[in-house]
């Protein structure tokens, strides 16, 4: 990450990332942070066990990836 986000930005990104219905694409549109940057922020801000729990949740969640959600809705 080139610049460190402010604490307000960080809190906003963490809140959006925890929401099941907010896709990584929407997070990027609203904050400018790509999925890899969101993961980096979450890794830095959460306790290791909380980060692992979050990663497990979002890895299998179709709603976190807009394209996967669109494919599921079509089929």
Image (cartoon, grey):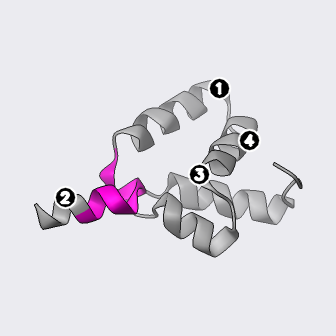
Q: Which residue is mark 4?
A: 45
Q: Which mark is residue 48?
A: 1
CA–CA distance in space, label 2 to label 4 = 32 Å
Give me the residue at 49% from left, 32% from top.
53
CA–CA distance in space, label 1 to label 4 = 9 Å
SS class, disc 1: helix
SS class, disc 3: helix
Crowding at dot 1, Cα within 10 Å, few <14 / some 14-19 / many 20+, comes out as few
Q: Which residue ends up furthest to the top in the rendered image?
A: 49
Where's residue 56, x and y in %?
43, 33
Residues in magenta, as a range: 61-70
Specify which label sits upstream in the sequence, 3 or 1: 3
Give me the residue at 50% from left, 36% from top.
55
As for residue 72 lying within the magenta part, the answer is no
CA–CA distance in space, label 2 to label 3 = 21 Å
Of residues 52 and 72, the one nearer the viewer is 72
């Amino acid at each position: 990450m080139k610049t460190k986000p402010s604490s307000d930005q960080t809190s906003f990104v963490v809140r959006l990332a925890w929401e099941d219905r907010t896709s990584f694409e929407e997070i990027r549109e609203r904050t400018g942070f790509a999925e890899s940057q969101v993961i980096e922020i979450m890794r830095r801000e959460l306790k290791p066990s909380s980060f692992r729990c979050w990663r497990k949740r979002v890895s299998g969640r179709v709603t976190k990836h807009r394209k996967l959600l669109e494919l599921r809705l079509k089929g």
